Image: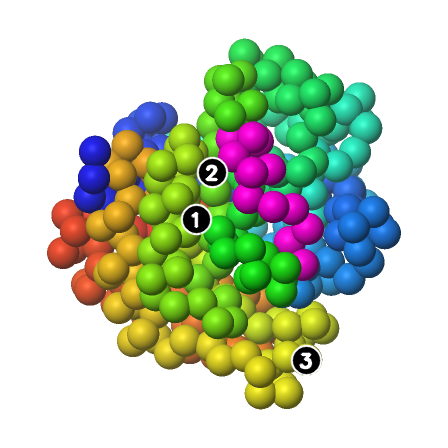
Amino acid sequence: MTGAGMLLGDYLKKTYGCKVYKLSLSAKVTCPNRDGTLGTGGCIFCSAGGSGEFAARADLPIDQQIREAKQRVARKIKGEAKYIAYFQSYTNTYADPEYLEHIFREAMRPEDVVALSVGTRPDCLPEAVLDLLERLSREKPVWVELGLQTIREDSARYIRRGYELPVYDRAVRELKARGITVVTHLILGLPGETHEDMKASVRYVAASGADGIKLQLLHILKGTDLAAEYEAGRVRVMEQDEYISLLGELVPLIPRSMVIHRLTGDGDKRLLIAPLWSGNKRVVMNEIRRSVLKPNGLLDSEKSTSE
């Protein structure tokens, strides 16, 4: 099937009958790109917070993180709501399986938490963790979000991704064999990549077996190695019109069977260096609705998601 998959907000409302919000939680883990296993600086674009600036405080127990995360989204809620426990920052399968089981079960415990979402790397899914995720998925749906970013190997080396493309393919196969939902993350606008390169990445993910896709605009954040590259003039960022035009090329490549989890992204404004236009999410999303979603028969947008 081809032609513009379902948006996440619409999928969740259809599945659960109400709005569903992600609660960003902290697992208090690290990453092989930070602890010296593969490197110490993280991926070139990754902030000190491990791309989890909006997550709850890692020093709090999970039940308290959930309470505070619910308070943060409470102003958005009108009527009934349910939640997804979302572990986003760093690599959330890069820890002892017993510890992971404890925190994941704590996060899944509330009745109004309908699913568990775990952000990780494809090279951090050992057998014991895969078995754990399979056991948990028998109780509530489990999503695993894989940071692929690009299929170009030279781009992957530049951003210090730390694994080759077949590792992603194997991770998708292993997760799908265990009945686990797979969501793949791509970054649009990596240095040196053309629109055709980004189209190739979207097509690859669409054919990979993944259930969902996240399209993320490249952000330049303070304190990252990418910021130094940008300030040295070696990296350009897309203007708003270019980015929205690109989305217009990419969205029709996404199969109808695939859920679109994200079409842009808004970095922490305290850290955002560029592109500054992306900080005005309401304006950006209104233009995406007008120029991308409506022409492709998608009636709503990310405003019904919670990231």
- Mark 2 highlights which residue? 183
Q: Residues within 10 Å of mark 2 (few under 14, many from 20)?
A: many
- At numbered mark 3, what does the secondary structure look like: helix, strand or loop? helix
Q: Position of residue 48 (x, y in %)?
A: 73, 62
Query: Residue 87 in the image: x percent, y percent?
Result: 63, 40
Residues rendered magenta in the picture: 160-172
Position of residue 238 in the picture relative to residue 55 (left or right): left
Tell me, yes or no, if residue 226 can be seen here: yes
> Which residue is under mark 1?
214
What kind of element bears circle 2? Answer: strand
Q: CB atoms at circles 2 and 1 under 8 Å apart? A: yes
Is 127 located above or below residue 5 in the figure? above
Residue that appears at 36% across and 37% down: 207
* Amino acid carrying mark 1 in the image: Lys
Residue 63 visible in rendering: no
Q: Tell me if residue 162 is in the magenta stretch.
A: yes
Q: CA distance from mark 3 to mark 2?
A: 30 Å
Toward which corner of the image does residue 239 lie, by quadrant? bottom left
Q: In this rendering, is residue 67 above or below 116?
A: below
The answer to which of 21 and 246 lies nearer the viewer is: 246
> Quick one: label 1 or label 3, which is nearer the N terminus?
1
User: Which amino acid type is marked by label 2?
Assistant: Val
Dot placed on the residue nearer the N-terminal end, 2 or 1:
2
Residue pictured at 49% horizontal, 80% vertical: 236
User: Magenta region, mostly helix, strand or loop?
Assistant: helix
Which residue is depicted at the point 70% across and 21% down? 127
Labelled disc at residue 228 = 3
